[in-house]
Amino acid sequence: CCRQQNVLHGVSRLSRLSHAQCEPAFICEEHRAPVANLPILVWLVVIEGYSWVFFHVMSHSKMTQRNKHIAMGRKKFNMDPKKGIQFLLENNLLQHTPEDISQFLYKGEGLNKTVIGDYLGERDEFNLDVLQAFVELHEFADLNLVQALRQFLWSFRLPGEAQKIDRMMEAFASRYCGCNPGVFQSTDTCYVLSFAIIMLNTSLHNPNVRDKPPVERFISMNRGINEGGDLPEELLRKLFDSIKNEPFKIPEDDGNDLTHTFFNPDREGWLLKLGGRVKTWKRRWFILTDNCLYYFEYTTDKEPRGIIPLENLSIREVDEPRKPNCFELYNPNHKGSLIKACKTEADGRVVEGNHTVYRISAPTTEEKEEWIKSIKYVFSIPALYEILAVGQLYRPLHCVVAVRLCRRGQTWVALPHIHTYIHPLCTLSPLQSPLWSA
């Protein structure tokens, strides 16, 4: 057909073949993938034993409209959480399930932390289900109670109403005991001690409180709370010292987040990272964009704690006895050598990273697979970003890129020499053929 001839004509120019030399082309089904933060269509065209993959960058008007709706939904949520969620539901940006809404609140992108706390503290049955799902998104395994509280209380601001605080702390205590069986005799013990720690934080760090309690008073206040027995004094001293040395951080209440700085990343989310020098697992907010992996301590941080350039790195799944769903980044060409990366120390100094591999744990198997897929995709398209950058000088919203492949056994391998061609037919659309599948 005419459209097939146009495709072949573009390829023949690309491969320096005459139109008469081209064999009939078979074009695979449509396939979408993110390139340069825009959706693309992919075709596979066979010509004289070689295959050409076409990447057609589509208009981002739909993505822009979706982003506008998301931004509007966040603003509505910050003014009225129920109206904001209803707006997102009506525009098919959220599903009406506790799991989906809790994920939205847990990520907290652009959301007012006080409003999140007020919504989670509501006593409606659906809100209680959202609170339960929200708490279950936190991973408290192998954390002491102060560390777990720091993580939990950073994801929202505690509301002022006592009944709301009570519901939220009960959910926290249940989740903590579920992640750390045997630490306390019951969830009531965890609940009472959690409140005592929050009160201690206020007493030690509120300038209006002149009578600062010593550790002996804190230990005395918590006698008999472990089902009638006492908690180990060493545990209570460690919790006291932790709060004394570092108060709880109160999240900013302005609704700002990283979407302004890292707009529309390839992927983002909470992961656990194993330290390089000190082998401890720390929860970090990771952002994959611009061929780099950034990680932050909190989503509200303005600067990353570390930057891992992905150039020359590879990724693989690994078995980790202490953590499930692990993968790691490594340099296949220089095994045992430090990966070129940087991080910010607590005193603000920027230093070189101390990792020969970056071992990372995802919350679920599905998220691990998605992260591996996203990072592998970044590995596979470094040249395409440059190609698209050049192509967009001519076609800001539409262009076609062709990469020549050869077949080795059952695997399609990109040849070192990459041919590019900015196709004049911006409206080119994929054809369907029963002889090829996506």
Image: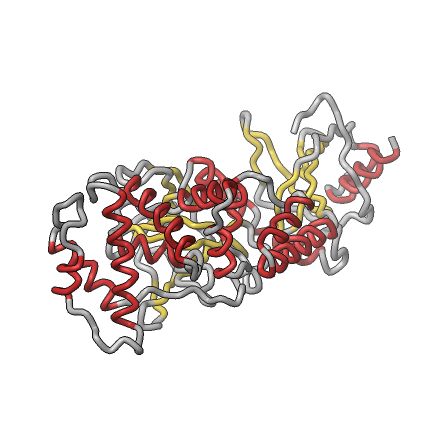
Looking at the image, what colour scheme do you see? secondary structure
Above-or-below relation of 205 to 122: below
In screen coordinates, is 76 left or right of 146? right
Provide residue 116's location: percent of width, then percent of height.
50, 55
Which residue is rendered at x = 65% and y = 42% of the image? 403
Which residue is rendered at x = 23% and y = 41% of the image? 186
Above-or-below relation of 79 to 375: below
155, 196: nearer the viewer: 196
In screen coordinates, is 412 left or right of 166? right
Which residue is rendered at x = 70% and y = 40% of the image? 41
Query: Residue most toward the right?
Result: 2
Provide residue 119's location: percent of width, then percent of height.
51, 52
Which residue is rendered at x = 74% and y = 52% of the image? 61
Q: Quadrant of residue 238?
A: bottom left
Q: Quadrant of residue 78?
A: bottom right
Provide residue 354's location: percent of width, then percent of height.
30, 58
228, 396: nearer the viewer: 228
In screen coordinates, is 83 left or right of 352? right
Above-or-below relation of 311 to 405: below
